[in-house]
Image (spheres, rainbow, N blue to C red):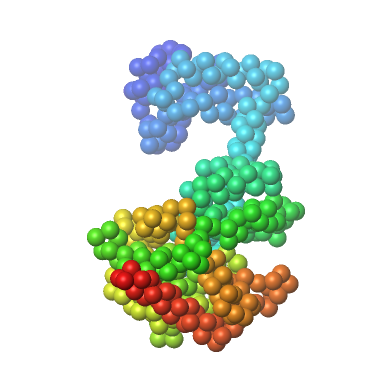
Amino acid sequence: MRRQDIKRRPLSDTVLSNLEPEPKLYREQDGNNLYFKVKPDGKKAWELRYKRADGKWSWLGLGIYPSVSGSRARELAEKYRKQISDGHDPVAKKNQLKADLKNVAESSFKMLALDWFEGRKDRWGESYQKRVMGAFELHVFPVMGKRDFREITPLEWFRFFQKMQKKGILDQTENVRRSCRGVYNLAKVTGRVTSNPVDGLEEELYKHTSENYPHVPPADLPELVYKIKEMSEERFSPEIRYGLSILMQLAVRPTELREAPWSEFDLKKALWEIPAERNKSGRALLVPLSKEVMADLLELRKISGGYQLLFPGRHDQSKPLSNMAFNMALRRLGYEGRQVGHGFRHVMSTCLNENDFNKQHVEAQLNHFEKGVAGNYNKAIYIKQRTKMMQWYSQHLHQLADGYRLTCNQ
């Protein structure tokens, strides 16, 4: 239908649906400054023409046709005419609303975190990028993502991390806390906040939990080592057996081993470098590998050497094994409540100190350091001494297992 064939107004539904487009956009008045707009591509919409407070005319869009019918457009037009007569400018109000929504979106913690992530991801490997963003999406964004980052208090962050701790994912809690602290550091240096609400929380979060994990006493250690060495293939996968053996001997944090890529290992030099971004201390650590650990790694490489990670996930090889895998294996060995993966750190510390190894060498192996020397921290500190110490420790553990075997066979 051509526009010149219109007989009456308001425009009927038949006219609205059948009006044909023209080479140029045109508007047909429906009545009382309500117009029906037809574009050259055939798209149609409603607009209200009104006079602003400064006396100038303006257009207010009321919606696309046919989503907004003729009757609905007339109802909306009447509503906005009343607002205008009361001194309100609907376009200015709509523009302010858009600006407010944009400001809220740009001030959300999620947008700030994405900004931080984009600025750092090129420094990280692909697997670490996935772990960082995966932790945000799983734990942080559902709770804090839409919040204005400027309004989240230290107490709210403290309670958030406490809830994560209660789930038993202490290492992941620390990784997330460290990432959130980095996000706020970006906001601070760019002038968006004056203080970091995550600063200092680690002292309260971890002072009652640091290294306080279930672990067997020295008298029960021979049996535990023996059971790990003799884990049957019928009950446990080989990668879990080798993983527990390596974890027991190196006493690194379980997450550091479970998420480790093969690229961090120099098997020719028998060294493993855990980078700062994967380390709870925030500093790189060079870990010497004993002959016994090397034997486990070489066997493990036959299983997972074709993947990026030492312990790839069952369903997605780009992600690490479940964070409960090692602890579940210990439970099945009969050590529920008595030994967890993180507890091997306490076991090693006790054993080495009781055998008169230098305390500084032990602390360096655990990647513990005194405050004040952090700036001068060397990832290879005491590496020669630690290499000898960790070789002794591996041999000691194997001797305990052999001794227990002999006892069982008597």
Q: Residue furthest front?
A: 410
Place of residue 363 in the rendered image (x, y in percent of width and height, measured from the top left): 61, 74
Q: Is residue 384 left or right of residue 195?
A: left
Q: Nearer the viewer, residue 98 or 10?
A: 98
Indicate the position of residue 360 as horizontal and vertical percent values: 64, 78
Q: Residue at x 33, y 68 (%)?
A: 408
- Asked whether, in this view, residue 379 is left or right of residue 336, the answer is right
Q: Residue at x 48, y 48 (%)?
A: 138
| 143, above or below 378, in the image | above
Depth check: give the residue in front, 178 or 400: 400
Visible residue check, residue 187: no
Nearest the eye: 189 or 63:
189
What x and y, as percent, mark residue 290? 44, 81
Where 25 sits versus 352, above or below? above
The residue located at (71%, 69%) in the rendering is: 371
Locate the C terminus by quadrant: bottom left
* Quadrant of residue 330 within the rendered picture: bottom left
Residue found 31% across the figure and 57% down from its top: 314
Q: Position of residue 13 (x, y in %)?
A: 38, 16
Q: As displayed, is residue 110 above or below residue 171?
A: above
Q: Which quarter of the figure is the N terminus placed in?
A: top left
